[in-house]
Amino acid sequence: GKVKLFCHSSTRSPPHLTHSLEFTPVNKKVLCSEMAFTPSVLQQSSSSTTTTTTRAAICASSSSSKKSSNLAVRRTSRGRKVTATVMASSSNKVEPAIIIGGGRVGQALFDMGVEGDVIVKRDDEFPSSPSSGPIFVCTRNDVLETVIEKTPANRREDLIFMQNGYLDSFLQSKGLEKNTQALIYFAVAKFGEKPTDGVTSVNPEGLTAVTGKWSDQVAARFHNGDLSCHVKDAAKYRASMLEKLIWISAFMLVGAQHPGATVGDVATTHKSEVEGLIKELVQGVADINDVTFEAGTLERLLAYADSVAHFPTAVKEFEWRNGFFYNLSTQTMQQSKDDPFPKHTAMLKAINAI
């Protein structure tokens, strides 16, 4: 059926003026062109359902500069062009959420959300409202322990972890191994900007994935921001998570061998190096961790590199990234067996990372 989009104009236009566009969905997604006004009400209507999301209250809070120690109320779309998107594939209603972390990703999730959302900085006290629902953790790995400690015990099962790297051992140590985890393949270039989805020539459907209790809510919020998201069971998610861990560990480590190299440089000038390292890591992880990767891992990871070719390279957060593979090497060699990742170990030694 047809979809009609109503948008009230900004204060620059005559009061009560409403813009209306009508179009027909194609391929489960409807896009309307950029419009130079700030939407305060978005209404999606069809033959069966009508959903209205109001932003006016939050915009009003922002304009009055009303703040509290726990709540950062910001809307970055005010006064600039907005691309309005209706995701017909999202059947779940976005619920109010707590977002911990006021950086680029946290703000982006807030902008994708609904009235009732609360965004706090990692050092703020845990908010009392909303008292239920998802809690998105958008912080660096090194403050996760503090975030968990500040979260009331009865709310910890609602924490959603979105960090890069291998989190399983850490979450197990906190009794949170069954919590929702999201694998992020989108990028936010600058604070307040709309995220860019990491769709590639190999995976035009996108690679972002989620598993756990709040999977549907994560997917609904991402879809609300015109981002792809695939809900997976635990086993398939684990394989996808390890695949991305291999990507970031391999590309960053090969790039570190060549100071100043970008991801794009690694994928082109140093392609043979990174391909060899990826193959080594995939084979070793599959053997040691009994993981089955979907066919085409190398092609998927190289294609993703093309989508973020401008990114710089550096070995960071060693404990959460390359450290995972180095620990497997150490444990294996302690059993008088060969290093399953000799290329990886040699590259770490070359940059004095171990």
Image (tube, rainbow, N blue to C red):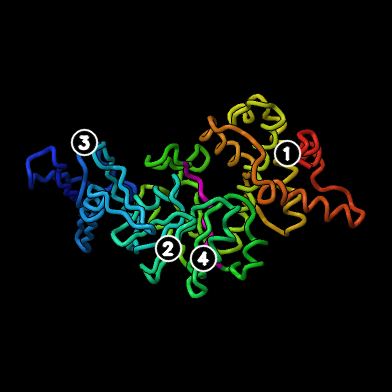
Badge 4 element? helix
Disc number placed over residue 150 in the picture, else none: 4
Badge 1 element? helix
Q: Residues within 10 Å of mark 2 (few under 14, many from 20)?
A: many
Residue for point 78% across, 36% down: 352
Badge 3 element? loop
Would residue 322 be counted in the magenta stretch? no
Going by the numbered disc 2, the residue's amino acid type is Asp
Disc number placed over residue 277 in the picture, else none: 1
Mark in the foreground, 2 or 4: 4
Quarter of the C terminus within the rendering: top right
Q: Are marks 2 and 4 in contact (CB under 8 Å)?
A: no
Residue 260 falls in image quadrant? top right
Q: Are marks 1 and 2 in contact (CB under 8 Å)?
A: no
Mark 1 or mark 4, earlier in chain: 4
Going by the numbered disc 1, the residue's amino acid type is Leu
Whole-percent x, y for residue 39 in the image: 21, 46
Mark 3 or mark 2, earlier in chain: 3
Mark in the foreground, 3 or 2: 3
Going by the numbered disc 3, the residue's amino acid type is Ala
Disc number placed over residue 36 in the picture, else none: 3
Q: CA distance from mark 1 to mark 3?
A: 47 Å
Quarter of the N terminus within the rendering: bottom left
Q: Are marks 1 and 3 in contact (CB under 8 Å)?
A: no
**Most common SS among magenta residues:** strand
For disc 2, the marked residue is 216
Whole-percent x, y for residue 267 in the image: 62, 30
